[in-house]
Amino acid sequence: MTRTRYGVSPWVGGAARKATYPALAERLEIPIVIIGGGLTGVATAYACAAAGLRVALVEADRIGHGASAMGAGIVQQTPPIGLVDMEAQHGRRVAKAISTAWRRAALELAATVRRLNIRAGFTPAEGITWAQTSSAAGPLERELAARRAAGLEGTWLTRRAIASIGLDGVGGIRTRGDAIVDPVKLCEGFARAAAARGAMLFERTRAVAVSQARGRIEIQSARGRIACETVIVATGEPTGLFDPLARHVAACSAYAVQTPPAKAAVRVAVRDRSLILQDSQQPPHRLAWTAGDRILWTGADSPRVADRLLAQTVVQRTGQLMYELSLLLHDISGVQPEHGWQVPYSVGRDGLPIVASHRSYPHHLFAFGLGTNPAAAFLASRLLLRHLNGTSDKADAAFGFTRETR
């Protein structure tokens, strides 16, 4: 019988990887310093180094083994907020800019992974968002109409087309540009690419203080210091060093399970295992197939629980997810997952990322509220590079701290 590993994602594996990069133990001066070695940080380090900029990155633990390692690894070319809702909050122009930038980032991420030959199991897929009831189908039809009006792609699926996939539903939207990826190997691949182009990477180097004097920033760790012109805070959410900015984001958790290799009856029930499936609930559940015919199933999003409650919450949410999965795939009933874990993330108060400067912190750039989608991290790296190069356009303001809402 399968024994579930609670609190451990399948991407981390068994034995802990030794540090690949040194800890900072000296005084340095370099123009750009990135705090945070998750996917946003390493993708930004690569973007800067590839553009000829001198950059260093400091990570408190091991690169790619923080929140990024707990992600589901599901790349989606659509933002977490539907276009109809974004238009209601921010207007049509801003909503279109966000959706277009997001899709472009997902496609560019796939192209960059191929070009750099990053071996992270990056598997392109099409996405299906389906409605199980007629009342849920209406909003999806309006969403598709808004996407088409904005020049974005999408195809409507009829009840028969949904049934041909093996789903019980009345309709849905099919999109291209999604993927499944090992997020740890993806981080490690971008880190190698950044280092090969001259970026300085430091693991086990926690930034314990960030100070500013005479237009210069100084980042202090336990054993060293780096002076720089610009610091990029790519920690996903404000750390203790930037507590005043915490009001701009909401700390959340999704939960995920991965099953053992599926039995034949389950594989037959889902006729196209190359798809990433998402229901129309809010927040949604997502299903993808990983190596060895394993099912990855995520959902049960909620506000972040206290650390003392996390272990029991993971066990409870794992059971909840497996029950919900059994309602979709009856033959999975009784199966124990190999892994059940928390996916910590944060989002801006409107559900969207914040990638911008802040008037209270000169010479700082921030990447907060990026959710769980690797496409958002890659998008942030593009936005940050444009900030550094002075080439930001009007659409980039849609990701600012002060974006307008209606």
Image (spheres, helix red, strand yellow):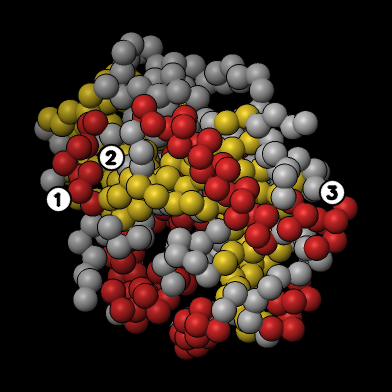
Query: At 52% across and 21% down in the image, what residue appears?
Result: 21
Q: Amino acid at mark 1?
A: Arg
Residue for badge 3: 263
Q: Residues within 10 Å of mark 2 (few under 14, many from 20)?
A: many
Q: Residues within 10 Å of mark 3 (few under 14, many from 20)?
A: few
> How far apart are labels 3 and 1 at the CA level?
56 Å
Query: Is there a contact, CB below 8 Å, between mark 1 and mark 2?
Result: no
Looking at the rendered image, the quarter that the C terminus falls into is bottom left
Front disc: 1 or 2: 2
Q: Going from the N terminus, do you reach mark 2 or mark 3 first?
A: 2
Q: 400 and 382: which one is in front?
A: 400
Q: Is residue 121 visible?
A: yes
Q: Residue furthest front?
A: 334
Query: At 39% across and 50% down in the image, what residue appears?
Result: 302
Percent of width and height locating residue 272: 79, 65
Q: 170 and 185: which one is in front?
A: 170
Looking at the rendered image, the quarter that the N terminus falls into is top right
Residue for badge 1: 359
Query: At 74% across and 32% down in the image, what residue appears?
Result: 2
> How far apart are labels 1 and 2 at the CA level?
16 Å
Q: Is residue 190 visible?
A: no
Percent of width and height locating residue 106: 56, 60
Q: Is residue 160 left or right of residue 227?
A: right
At numbered mark 1, what does the secondary structure look like: helix, strand or loop? Answer: loop
Residue for badge 2: 238
Q: 191 and 241: which one is in front?
A: 241
> How far apart are labels 2 and 3 at the CA level?
43 Å
Front disc: 3 or 1: 3
Is 302 rendered above or below residue 312? below
Q: Is residue 242 left or right of residue 354?
A: left
Is 388 rendered above or below residue 34? below
